Image (cartoon, helix red, strand yellow):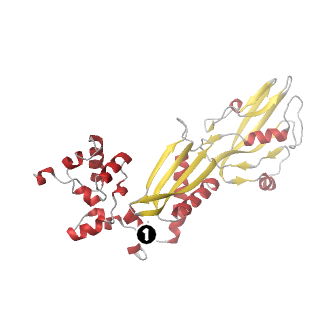
Amino acid sequence: MHIIQEEIGPPVFSASQVGKGDDSHAIFTIAPLPPGYGVTLGNAMRRSLLSSLPGTAVTSVRIKGVQHEYTTLKGVHDSVVDICLNLKQLKLRKFNKDPEIVSLVAKGPKTIKAKDLKVSSDIEVLDPDVVILNLEKGGEIDMDITVEKGVGYAPAADRNKKQNEPGLIHIDAIFSPVERVKFDVESSRVGQRTNLDKLIMDVETNGSLTAEEAMQFASQLLKSYFEYFGSDDKIVENEFVADFSRSGVQGIQDDETSHIKESYTPIEILNFSPRTLNALINAGVGSIEQLTKCTEASLSNFRGFGAKALDEVHKTLAERGLALSDDSMDA
């Protein structure tokens, strides 16, 4: 990480779902980040999310009595072109990579939806109410739909050159499970630093992957590429790469060093809740070093500082190998 992170602390990653019980749409926040890193990370993640995640799509269809997509069927309200467009809207989850054929046989009058597809245990229909076609009285349909798992966008023209069979209609396939990605960069502050970044990413998928799984896959993919640029065995100019074992929160040698490090170890990097943080700052405790010199009794006398805040301080300091001053030392 950037050496600035030693001063401001490691960035904190958090996620919140949009909508109750809907894990396909979430907002992710990571902060604090060095200046400019919000756009750097956000743009890389957005491009990976939209282009490189695996998903499931319909790649071709074969309809009984149809030789090409411009054919019309008696008793079928929709044209073959409309049927193909509707098939592109199907939201499916496939667990195996191999292509699979899904059959659809029906008679009218009836509105045929995604739930009418005869799928195996390897395929899950995520939105059963998607309309595929409408049959009139006396109309019938018999078709085989090829479902595949892939990445990115596969145009029908490319597959038509490789597999040009009479009666087989290829469909443009959009495999990406990510429907929308948006990122914003806001200002963040730690202590006296006011030029830091906060990255906020809004990710929505079709349900075949959760928003959190999409973020994990994209980050792992980018990491695998970045590893080609360097070696873990050798760090160039290692004194300018963040090493949190060197940060001021690890210990204080003497009073002079303590005074210096207090100005570089703002209490904000401990990520206390707003209520606890405000109570400490209002009481004049602005650094980690000042906090570790406090006792439970002195903290309890702070205005707005209760038992929950005291528990939060104990837990947060313990995570960093620190603790409050012993009450017995002041006796």
**Residue at which label 1 appears:** 232
Along the viewing direction, whichever of 177 and 46 lies nearer the viewer: 46
User: Callout 1: helix, strand or loop?
Assistant: loop
Q: Percent x, y for residue 253? A: 21, 68
Percent position of residue 10, x then y:
40, 59
Residue 199 lies left or right of residue 206; in this view the side is left
Q: How many callouts does the rendering have?
A: 1
Q: Residue furthest bottom?
A: 237
Q: Is residue 14 above or below residue 223?
A: above
Residue drawn at x 86%, y 23% as measured from the top left: 138
Q: Is residue 90 above or below residue 49?
A: above
Please give the name of the residue rendered at 27% of the width and 45% of the height, measured from the top-left corner. 310
Q: Please tell me whether residue 252 is drawn above or below residue 184 in the rendered image.
A: below
Task: Give the x, y percent position of residue 272.
Answer: 35, 50
> What amino acid is labelled 1 in the image?
Asp
Q: Which residue does the image show at 37% across and 65% down from the upper left?
A: 7
What residue is at 23 percent from the left and 66 percent from the top? 252
Corner quadrant of residue 89: top right
Please say whether residue 98 is visible from this viewpoint.
no
Q: Nearer the viewer, residue 300 or 76?
A: 300
Could you tell whether 78 is left or right of 260 in the image? Answer: right
Q: Position of residue 198 (x, y in %)?
A: 49, 57
In-front residue for pair 226/265:
265
Q: Is residue 186 visible?
A: yes
Taking the image as shown, residue 203 lies to the left or right of residue 193, namely right
Bin the neighbour count of mark 1 within 10 Å (Cα to Cα): few under 14, some 14-19, many 20 and up. Answer: few
Q: Which of the image's four quarters has the N terminus?
A: bottom left
